[in-house]
Amino acid sequence: MSETLTSIDNSILTITLNRPEKRNALNDTLVNSLKDSLREADKNRNLRAVVIKGAGKDFCSGADLSALRKIAESDVMENLADAENLLELFSIIRKIKIPVIAAVHGRALAGGCGLATACDLVLATRSARFGYSEVKIGFVAAMVMAILRRNLSEKRAFELVTQGFDFSSEEAEKIGLINRVFDDEIFDEEVKNYVSVYEKVSRSAVVLSKKLLYQMDGMAFETALETGAEVNTIARLTEDCQKGIARFLEK
């Protein structure tokens, strides 16, 4: 059985984490399969967005027992290579041209919460639960901190990664960690409606916007403005923008 399943509806790719019997817990095979699916998606110019969801009752419960056993039995260099495998997944999500959207139901805990956080947008059911629980077993939610530090206030991020408690999707929305909360009964329909927006707006504009937004991390204000001016110029010359201006002038 494949660790991930993929399907395309119009121009939206859905990647389903497919280890329902393990609550879609992360292991090397699942992480590598997810990376491969994302790389292939990045080559497809017909796609407008990617949705990542989980099969069964949960989105993703973090690392599985075999992964934890591997950590316990590996030396420092082997553990570094293992950590860098997850690092690469987070990096791919940020670098892929089109939006990557986590559709979370059930539990998104530890590495599973990190995976959701690494996505550009996060949607969740009202009953979903989140948590960076690594600290409870002496682990550190280390790589996801690079994203949390950009998404949340310093004090809120500190609280989440050092106390390890789980929290509701409504609390996650309140603090700015996720974008939307939908009722469980209509979640799939609402996700489809939300994501369909990317089929109606300019693909090139979205691609340029995503790249610029993340490129600005750490830039000085003036440098960010100058980079924005360069991207603005590039956008004006795209086919989408030229057609959009023509349609506007014809009204």
Image: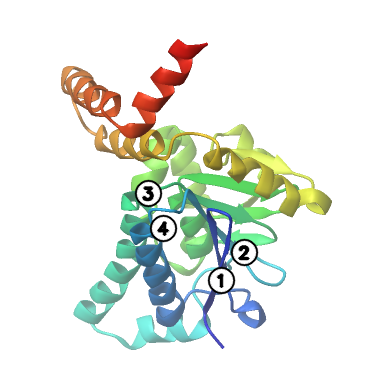
Structural crowding at the residue carrying mark 1, measured as other residues with C-alpha within 10 Å and reported as few (<14), some (14–19) or many (≥20): many
Residue type, numbered disc 3 = Met
Q: Is residue 137 above or below residue 142?
A: below
**Which callout, 1 or 3, points to the residue nearer the camera?**
1
Q: Secondary structure at mark 4?
A: loop
Query: Is 145 or 125 nearer to us in this picture?
Result: 125
**Which callout, 1 or 4, points to the residue nearer the camera?**
1
**Which callout, 2 or 4, points to the residue nearer the camera?**
2
**Residue placed under numbered mark 1 in the picture:** 17
Residue 20: percent from left, percent from top: 65, 77
**Disc marking residue 143:** none
The Cα–Cα distance between marks 1 and 3, rounded to whole angstroms, is 23 Å
Going 72% across and 69% down the picture, which residue do you hit? 57
Dot 2 or dot 4, earlier in sequence = 2
Residue type, numbered disc 4 = Ala
Q: Secondary structure at mark 2?
A: loop
Dot 1 or dot 3, earlier in sequence = 1
Quadrant in which the N terminus appears: bottom right
Residue 109: percent from left, percent from top: 57, 61
Residue 163: percent from left, percent from top: 52, 51
Residue 165 in view here: no
**Residue placed under numbered mark 3 in the picture:** 145
Structural crowding at the residue carrying mark 3, measured as other residues with C-alpha within 10 Å and reported as few (<14), some (14–19) or many (≥20): some
The Cα–Cα distance between marks 2 and 1, rounded to whole angstroms, is 8 Å
**Residue placed under numbered mark 2 in the picture:** 59
Q: Secondary structure at mark 3?
A: helix
Q: Is residue 11 left or right of residue 31?
A: right
**Disc marking residue 141:** 4
Structural crowding at the residue carrying mark 4, measured as other residues with C-alpha within 10 Å and reported as few (<14), some (14–19) or many (≥20): many
Dot 1 or dot 4, earlier in sequence = 1
Find out whether the residues at labels 2 and 1 contact each other: C-beta distance under 8 Å. yes
Residue 124: percent from left, percent from top: 66, 49
